[in-house]
Amino acid sequence: MNKTKRTPAGDALTSLILDLFRLNSLLLTAGDRLVAGLGLTSARWQILGAIVSAERPQPVAWLARNLGANRQNVQRIINDLHKEGLVAFEANPHHSRAQLVVLTDKGTQTFDAAMRLQAPWINSLSDGLFVKDIETTRRVMMALRKKLETTANLKSEPDL
C-alpha cells in the first residue's frame, strides 16, 4: 500500500484530533450527568446556551450555523425544548417561515440552574491547569476551526 507520509506537524495534529474526539465524548457524558436532574442533556444545554449568548433572537438555521451543527438536529432538539416549555417561537420580521427562537422564563431558570452546577464543576476540572496553556490551546483550536470553515466551506446554511 502506497502511503503519503505526514509531516511532523501532521502527525502531531492527528494525535491532537484523536485526543479531541475522546475528550469530546467524555465532556458530553460528563455534561449529561451534570444536568440530568434538570431534564437536560449536553445537547439541549448547548442549544440553550447558544440562545442565551446570541445578541438577539435567531432562527434555527442561524443557531445551528453558530454551533457548527446540522440544522435538522438542532430543529429536532428545539422542538423538544418547545414541547417542554423551555423555548418559544416568535415571528421573524425578515422571514415569515423562519421563526425566531427565544427562551421562556422556565428555559431561563433551567439554564441558570445548569450554569450554577457548571461553575464548581469547571473550576474543579481546571484546577492545576495554567490559564496561559488553556488560552494557547484555544487559539490553536480557533485557527484550525477557521481553516476548516474556509477550506471546506462548512457554513453552508443560508442566511435567513
Image (cartoon, helix red, strand yellow):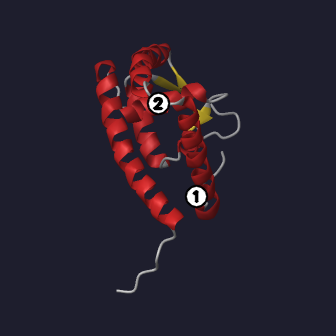
Q: Nearer the viewer, residue 66 or 77?
A: 66
Query: Which type of secondary structure does the marked residue at label 2 adopt?
Result: loop
Residue type at mark 2: give it: Leu
Left or right relative to 70: residue 150: right
Mark 2 surroundings: few (<14), some (14-19) or many (≥20) residues within 10 A: few
- Quadrant containing the N terminus in the rendered view: bottom left
Looking at the picture, does residue 45 appear above or below residue 62?
above
Taking the image as shown, residue 63 lies to the left or right of residue 38, namely right
**Residue 43 at least partly seen:** yes
> Cα distance, mark 1 to mark 2?
28 Å
Q: Which mark is residue 5?
A: none
Image spot of residue 133 (x, y percent):
54, 37
Q: Which residue is mark 2?
A: 129
Label 1 belongs to which residue? 148
Residue sitting at x 56%, y 39%:
63
In the image, residue 150 above or below residue 132? below
Type of amino acid at the residue the image marks with label 1: Leu
Q: How many marks?
A: 2
State the residue at coordinates (42%, 48%): 20
* Picture coordinates of residue 2, whole percent (x, y): 39, 86
* Residue closer to the observer: 2 or 93: 2
Q: Nearer the viewer, mark 1 or mark 2?
A: 2
Locate residue 57: give its quadrant.
top right
- Residue 124, given in percent of the width and then of the height, sits at 39, 22
